[in-house]
Amino acid sequence: MSESSVIHDIGYQRYTGPRLGRSAVFGAIYVHGLRAAYGFGRSAKAKIFPWLVMGIVILVGVILAAVRSQTGMLPLNYIQFADAMSWLIIFFVAIVAPELVSRDMKAGVLPLYFSRPLRAADYIGAKVAAMVTAVWALLAVPQFIIFLGAAFTTQNGMSDVWKELGDLLPAWGYSLLWALLFTGIGLLIASLTGKRAFAAGGIVAVFLMTTPIVGVLASLPSSTSQELAGLASPMTMVGGVGQWLVPTANTGLEIGSYGPVYAIETATLIFTCMLLLLARYRKVAAL
């Protein structure tokens, strides 16, 4: 060793704490995804659109609650509210889904994720859970505001509150179905490209371009074609399930006796999207 050589003690020590494992990584990705969906931890510009959507749907919920408290009438019931707001949430999904998955692909950080004790199923599960939570909250929070408006202005005491709760809970389940469908399609499309603009355009196109097909099929003279027309678009497919499960929902769809068909196709579409998403990331993880 030369006289000019110096040994520096930088205080390096081995990590001796607990190793949290896959569940902790899953939780961290979930929390990060949920925060990213609403712009937390990102620039002020990234917060504008998510909170604009949240503000609009909450404002609509407040207006509906106020109208009901003053007139006793609800222009949109809980399920109709979810249907009406679904068009706005399409654009929320088109912005958030690429943020959750496309950025990781573009930045090339997936090999770092999968170099840890994390499987492709864990990564996808955390992203799906974060997206479902974010979309469900957009519908569930205003629905709860409408419920509170009805609960605090009831004239018959707890009997009306329980009745209102019986209307709210199925609507929350219906909103969860919307969230699952939006998430499955949105994340699958976003996972195909690292360019967020392309991913966002593809998501909007899938939802909006299939809707006119429903109108064409519904205009056919066959009653069977009219009742099955809603299966041509994800937007109306979920509405058919809601109409079947809650006949008083009045979603505007005539489904006849094909309610189970709508439910089976909706479940199949969601399940297929999740499987394709998992296959996509297993392929990435294997590289």
Image (spheres, grey):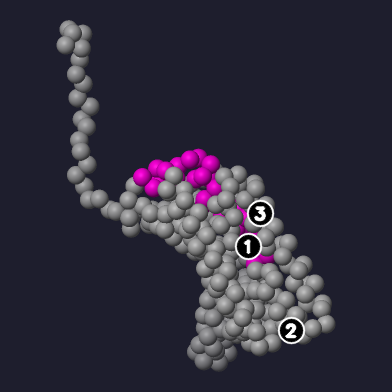
Q: Which of 169 and 28 is in front in this view?
A: 28
Q: Which of 91 and 227 is in front in this view?
A: 227
Q: Is residue 99 visible?
A: no
- Contact (CB < 8 A) between labels 1 and 2? no
What amino acid does circle 1 point to?
A: Ile
In the image, which residues are magenta? 86-115
Q: Name the residue under label 3.
A: 202
User: Picture coordinates of residue 191 (x, y %)?
Assistant: 55, 52
Disc nearer the start of the sequence (2/3): 3
Q: Does the magenta stretch include residue 103?
A: yes
Hey, which quadrant is residue 56 in on the image? Answer: bottom right
Spatial distance from mark 2 to mark 3, Cα to Cα? 31 Å
Above or below, comparing residue 140 to residue 206 in the picture: below
Instruction: Tell me the residue at 36%/45% (across/down).
Output: 115
Spatial distance from mark 1 to mark 2, Cα to Cα? 30 Å
User: Picture coordinates of residue 261 (x, y %)?
Assistant: 61, 81
Label ID, residue 89: 1
Instruction: Tell me the residue at 68%/69% (across/down).
Output: 233
Spatial distance from mark 1 to mark 3, Cα to Cα? 15 Å
| Secondary element type, mark 2 | helix
